[in-house]
Image (spheres, rainbow, N blue to C red):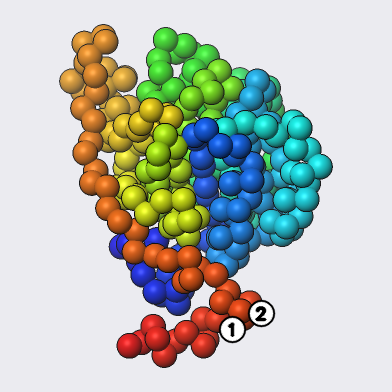
Amino acid sequence: KQEHLLGGSAVGRRLLAPMCGIFAYIGDRQAVALLVAALKRMEYRGYDSAGVGIHGTPIKICKNLGKVKGLETKCQGESASLEGTCGIAHTRWATHGKPSDENSHPHTTADNSVAVVHNGVIENYMTLKAQLTKKGYVFVSQTDTELLAHLIQDLKKEMPELTWTQIVAMGMSLCEGAYGVAFVFADDPDLIIGARKGSPLILGVGKNEYMLASDGAAIVEHTKDVVYLRDGEIVEMRRTGYNIQDLNKVARETRGEFSPRVPGSPQKIRENPIVRLELSLEEIEKGGYEHFMLKEIMDQPNALR
């Protein structure tokens, strides 16, 4: 259950949590420092590379093979170009393609107009990639994730009248497998879209700011008010609020296959409850131990009580 993945005892959470980490932020604060700090909170999950994407025209990307500390140093060297209050971040555990800067997240379109971070595996990515390659899209990584950026851009080109939420819903409905994703778009500085299928995502609700993460550890220092996305949901985050909908229903209605909505009429918004995150900073910090493994070993008596 997602509460075990995103909360609970330190030992239990780390034993059950999947690899790779997602964090996204939209608000009034400079994003890059928040993104890097969140990735540090998720280092225990295991990873081989890390990266951030900051909204801009084009979207600004900084990625690094190796530790988050190396990414932090790299970001500090590019601080002037990484200013912005909306962004996404990721720690990667290689599945498709070797550990490298090119294969690390975020992945973007050729013009950096769409950027995405992704947990999970897109099982039919080779089929979709072949279709996009025939259309002229050039892939620079070996990952299944890069496909998502090109796919979303292609759908938007074909149907420019649709909203990004509709486009993402349609695109992700074409993907087989498991995913947790977060997208940013160069043409909309007030938007992050997330979606999940089989891979957990949690929405942090702050004051005029929102966060999306694969792990509560990345959110708890900012807010304990959270919303757990249910499987098959898509969330639209803006500084003024958020909307959660059924992804497949949005995709079907957009295609006109099921109950097409009247133009201009609102989609039914899901009312997922805001709950308190049962997690403390003490649980996710090393607590004076040299590394997390040693802390977990010493914490086992407490976890079993």
Instruction: Pick the residue in front: 67 or 177.
Output: 67
Q: At x 46% / y 51%, what residue is drawn?
A: 222
The answer to whether residue 281 is left or right of residue 271 is right
Please name the residue that numbered disc 2 is placed on: 290
SS type, badge 1: helix
Residue 292 picture location, percent across and down: 58, 76
SS type, badge 2: loop
Looking at this view, name the residue that lies furthest to the left: 259
CB within 8 Å, label 2 to label 1: yes
Q: Quadrant of residue 126?
A: top right
Residue 65 picture location, percent across and down: 75, 53
Q: At x 44% / y 57%, what residue is drawn?
A: 220
Q: At x 76% / y 55%, what residue is drawn?
A: 70
Please name the residue that numbered disc 1 is placed on: 294
Tell me: residue 145, above or below residue 187: below
Residue 53 picture location, percent across and down: 63, 37
Tell me: residue 301, above or below residue 151: below
Question: Disc 2 residue type?
Answer: Glu
The answer to whether residue 61 is left or right of residue 183 is right
Instruction: Pick the residue in front: 98 or 222.
Output: 222
